[in-house]
Image (spheres, grey):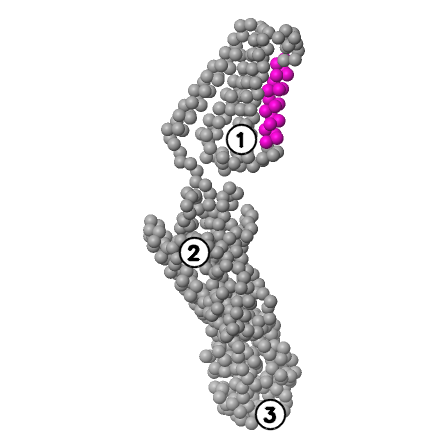
Amino acid sequence: MMLDCTSLYSQSLFHNIYEFNIYSLFTAGHFHNIYQFNFYSFFTAGHFHNIYQFNFYSLFTASHFHNIYEFNIYSLFTAGHFHNIYQFNFYSLFTAGHFHIIYTFYSYSSSTASHFYKIYQSRYYGLFTADLFHNIYHFYYYSLFTAGHFHIYTFNIYSHLLLQDVTKILDVVLNATEEVVTSSSADPKKLVSHGNRLLKASEKLVSMVVKQTNTSEYVNFTLDTVEGQVFMVGPQVTLDKIPRLDTTNSSVDIDLIGIAKNNNETRSAAVAFMSYNTMENLLKPDFFNTSNDTIKTMMSTVISATLPKTTNTKLTKPVNFTLKHIREFDPSGSLVCVYWNISEWIVDGCSVLKTNSSYTVCSCDHLSTFALIMQTSRPPKSDSLMDLLNLVCVIVGLVFFSLALLTFALCQWSPGVNNVARINICISLLLAHLLFLLTQRFLSLIQPLQVLCAVISGLLHFLFLSGFVWMFIEAVLLFICVKNLSQISSKKREVLSSGFLCVIGYLVALIVVCVSVGLVPEGYGSEQ
């Protein structure tokens, strides 16, 4: 491994430092307690007071650094570089605070620009990034600093490279879903088979980033097709509970600490949580078999939760999943939390804890692949013959209501006959049937507009009610006329005037509609 860093330290310092052959930067024999050094002067005058006189085929003699001759550095420091090295202002190049437990640090200024001002030019992916040591635990050097140097022998840097490889493979595999859907759209068995293979492959791949840890570690990744998070705990974990694992459209709460305690040998556990953005194209909601004939709609992304590399996978508590609705919620529908069982979605062991228009919380007593499915009643099949018969009857009714209205309005044989009730009956029923006919004709345009649906429903209710009220008024007038009640007849012109009858005929219907709206507001504008 060769550093491509001609300016790792400025040229006046280490202009040939790129020649380092550092399989182990400093071995235990060199600086095994380097973090304890007080580097107000990088090396005191006692170490380097005549450094320019050294013959640097072996950098320092064995009495100083007995293994340093293993370095492949013919001219690490020339006489011109470190003539007066003790005068350098290296206050804290490597102090205990910087590298004592380096893997826990997120230090943007662990080594300042004056020390490593071009260190980001190293050709190693994560040796020193532009933020210097922001992600130093990602180094893929098994022994960049050995245990004797900086107490970081717990590094397992290889997992970072594995994560990159895993995400690349996942991206390729899951992006092939569209081709499979296109070629297998008519064959549910092929969709199920491919979906199962994808689930197994993705879970196996993600399990490869799980590693042993003493405390806790966290890994996450985001692709166009899948989001994932992996949380690992070890025997020395200090957390009471792990944080909630979140993706864009889902989250999970799991008692991973309790599961780790149940693993008596390792006292460790790991959980992998993934949210698939395209898996519903393979594991369709129609694979949820129910006795009733309903429309199934996938209301969430398909998620997966597993316990990779965990011996005892028994849950200590039910696991709660919060699933965001990815489609419009229908209050009349029934939400069901389901899990994938090889060839179908089933409900066993899962239940809905709470739900609203945006989210649903599911509780399950096991881990698997989960989803949220909404069932809605299937609309009745259209009968063309009945539709035609209904259209003809309404049109015929409109014709005769129009004729009756013209007859009562224009033909009055006796001035003593009051046609107000008959005329208003015809007006109410004519308008009601006309509105009903237009609604049926333009139902597809009206149905998405909830407010318009509610207004039309209220108008129909009002017109039909007023028709019945006017029928009642007409019945009262006929009764008075037939019985020839003298007392009522004498006052009929005053009490039963046209204006008074109109108020009664329409006000009663309006009051009933208003009360109905107040008591059952959702009754207007619904599909029923």
Crowd band around label 1 with a 10 angstrom C-alpha radius: few (<14), some (14–19), many (20+): some
Height in image: 436 above or below 83? above
Q: Which residue in the structure is indicated by mark 2?
A: 340
Nearer the N terminus, badge 1 or badge 3?
A: 3
Crowd band around label 2 with a 10 angstrom C-alpha radius: few (<14), some (14–19), many (20+): some
- Quarter of the rendering containing residue 195: bottom left
- Quarter of the rendering containing residue 48: bottom right
Q: Which residues are magenta?
A: 497-516
Asked whether residue 383 is in view, the answer is yes
Q: Is residue 507 left or right of residue 346?
A: right
At label 2, the amino acid type is Trp
Height in image: 505 above or below 119? above
Q: Which residue in the structure is indicated by mark 3?
A: 50
- Label placed on residue 457: 1
Asked whether residue 230 is in view, the answer is no
Distance Cα–Cα, label 1 vs label 2: 42 Å
At label 1, the amino acid type is Ser
Crowd band around label 3 with a 10 angstrom C-alpha radius: few (<14), some (14–19), many (20+): some
Q: Is residue 225 magenta?
A: no
